[in-house]
Image (cartoon, rainbow, N blue to C red):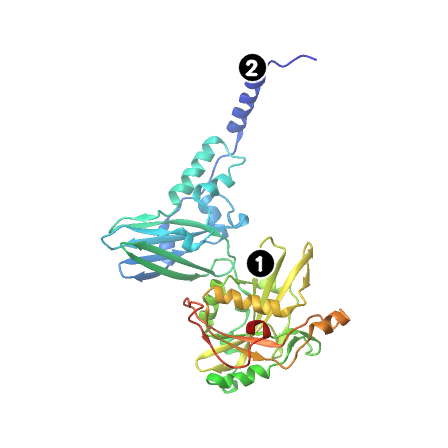
């Protein structure tokens, strides 16, 4: 067998690399006109700083960048920041997403299959369309920050600081092409005005205490899992609090493939989920709008559950439903979304011993407590929340 001389091998490798570069595909994208974004953007201002924000949908993103970024879990957010002050200000992308993607990082993730010229063009495209971090006095800067994708409503912050001052803006924007499950119903028309009972202040304890222990099947017969969380607030404020705490909406299509739970003679009004790190499980919140209010606030009866994956898409309910309730409350707490909290002792207590004795019925165990949360759209420090003295809290809070 003939030997291949080293210099010939190097020549062959160099030629192959050159041919690969020449044979790569071109980088194609459509022209980007920021005027369309500006016209549809939501605007907010604080003093000399004005911020406009918009979120392109999946198809529009692919047109702008020539790549299906949504398919990679990347979602660009378009921002325009106007600095009418006499000092330099800086935008902090980490405020919009603590784990945002750098522009050239996104380009690098998509380099395969392109020619050298195409890769250079891609790098330049992502770099040039990224929003600058520094905005000079009297100037306006615009561009994209590349965030982790949220399929439903996009809740995010924009922090701008400079000259010894900081400005924080909170946005909640709809992502084109996504319809949340609760959009299928008119929550405002669920009950007639004469049906709604108004419970002021502490009088709200009794209707919450007297709720059924659990959701049911469609016929209202078979008990399911406990109703263990109650949210109180205005509709839009509640949504902002949920999103800021890391909960994500469920699409109409996804919700249609899930087993429904029933209360008040209907299936749940909304489902929110939080995926655990590694994708080995998720927490789920289901809510029903209650036929009573508290002052000007709406009341939503909820069910917190935790599922972990066995094989593929097969999941199993975590029998410790109190863990799911406590996790949900902690998410709201650390999301700075709770204005006040109270506990109500339910009427159905399922000791852990009964679960271990049967291993079949019931499929869970619980101390029977319900966490009642007054949520806030604006951040509230956990040290400032109001702890209302209703029932003695669960034992784990007393230790």
Disc 2 packing (10 Å; few <14; some 14–19; many ≥20)? few
Which residue is identified by label 1? 275
| Residue 218 percent coordinates (x, y) | 67, 75
Tag 1 and tag 2, C-beta contact below 8 Å: no
Q: Identify the secondary structure beneath mark 1.
A: strand
Identify which residue, 312 or 89, lies in the foreground. 89
Identify which residue, 225 or 384, lies in the foreground. 384
117 horizontally vs 83: left or right: right
Whether residue 290 is visible: yes
Q: Residue furthest front?
A: 399
Whether residue 288 is visible: no
Which residue is identified by label 2? 7
Number of callouts: 2
Identify which residue, 73 or 279, lies in the foreground. 279
Disc 1 packing (10 Å; few <14; some 14–19; many ≥20)? some
- Indicate the quadrant containing the N terminus: top left, top right, bottom left or bottom right: top right
Q: Residue at x 34, y 53 (%)?
A: 80
| Residue 55 percent coordinates (x, y) | 44, 55
In the rendered image of this protein, does residue 324 appear above or below residue 135? below
| Residue 373 percent coordinates (x, y) | 50, 74
| Residue 36 percent coordinates (x, y) | 38, 53
In the rendered image of this protein, does residue 278 appear above or below residue 215? above
Q: Residue at x 58, y 57 (%)?
A: 276
Q: Identify the secondary structure beneath mark 2.
A: helix
Label annotation for residue 67: none
**N-terminal of the two: label 1 or label 2?**
2
In the rendered image of this protein, does residue 121 appear above or below residue 192? above
Q: Residue furthest left?
A: 86
- Indicate the quadrant containing the C terminus: top left, top right, bottom left or bottom right: bottom right
Mark 1 and mark 2: Cα distance apart in space: 54 Å
């Amino acid at each position: 067998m003939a030997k291949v001389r080293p210099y010939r091998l190097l020549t062959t490798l160099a030629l192959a690399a050159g041919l690969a570069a020449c044979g790569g595909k071109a980088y194609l994208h459509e022209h980007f006109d920021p005027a369309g974004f500006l016209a549809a953007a939501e605007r907010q201002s604080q003093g000399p700083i004005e911020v406009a924000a918009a979120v392109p949908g999946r198809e529009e993103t692919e047109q702008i960048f020539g790549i299906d970024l949504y398919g990679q879990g990347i979602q660009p957010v378009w921002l325009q920041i106007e600095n009418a002050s006499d000092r330099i200000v800086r935008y902090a992308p980490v405020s919009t997403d603590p784990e945002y993607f750098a522009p050239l990082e996104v380009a690098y993730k998509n380099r395969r299959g392109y020619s050298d010229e195409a890769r250079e063009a891609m790098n330049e495209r992502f770099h040039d369309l990224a929003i600058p971090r520094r905005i000079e006095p009297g100037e306006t800067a615009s561009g994209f920050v590349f965030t982790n994708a949220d399929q439903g409503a996009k809740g995010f912050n924009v922090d701008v600081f400079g000259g010894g001052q900081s400005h924080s803006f909170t946005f909640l924007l709809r992502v084109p092409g996504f319809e949340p499950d609760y959009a299928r119903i008119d929550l405002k028309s669920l009950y007639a005005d004469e049906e709604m009972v108004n419970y002021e202040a502490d009088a709200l304890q009794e209707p919450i205490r007297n709720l059924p222990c659990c959701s049911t099947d469609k016929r209202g017969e078979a008990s399911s899992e406990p109703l263990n969380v109650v949210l109180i607030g205005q509709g839009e404020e509640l949504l902002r609090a949920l999103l800021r705490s890391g909960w994500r909406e469920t699409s109409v299509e996804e919700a249609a493939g899930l087993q429904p739970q029933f209360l008040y003679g209907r299936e749940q009004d909304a489902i929110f989920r939080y995926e655990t790190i590694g994708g080995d499980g998720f927490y789920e919140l289901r809510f029903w709008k209650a036929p009573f209010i508290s002052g000007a606030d709406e009341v939503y009866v909820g069910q917190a559950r935790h599922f972990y994956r066995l094989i593929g898409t097969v999941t199993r309910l975590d029998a410790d439903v109190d863990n799911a309730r406590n996790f949900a409350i902690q998410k709201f707490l650390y999301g700075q979304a709770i204005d006040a909290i109270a506990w109500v002792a339910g009427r159905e207590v399922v000791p852990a011993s009964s679960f271990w004795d049967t291993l079949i019925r019931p499929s869970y165990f619980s101390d029977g407590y319900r966490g009642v949360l007054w949520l806030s759209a604006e951040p509230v420090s956990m040290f400032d929340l109001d702890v209302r003295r209703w029932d003695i809290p669960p034992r784990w809070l007393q230790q």
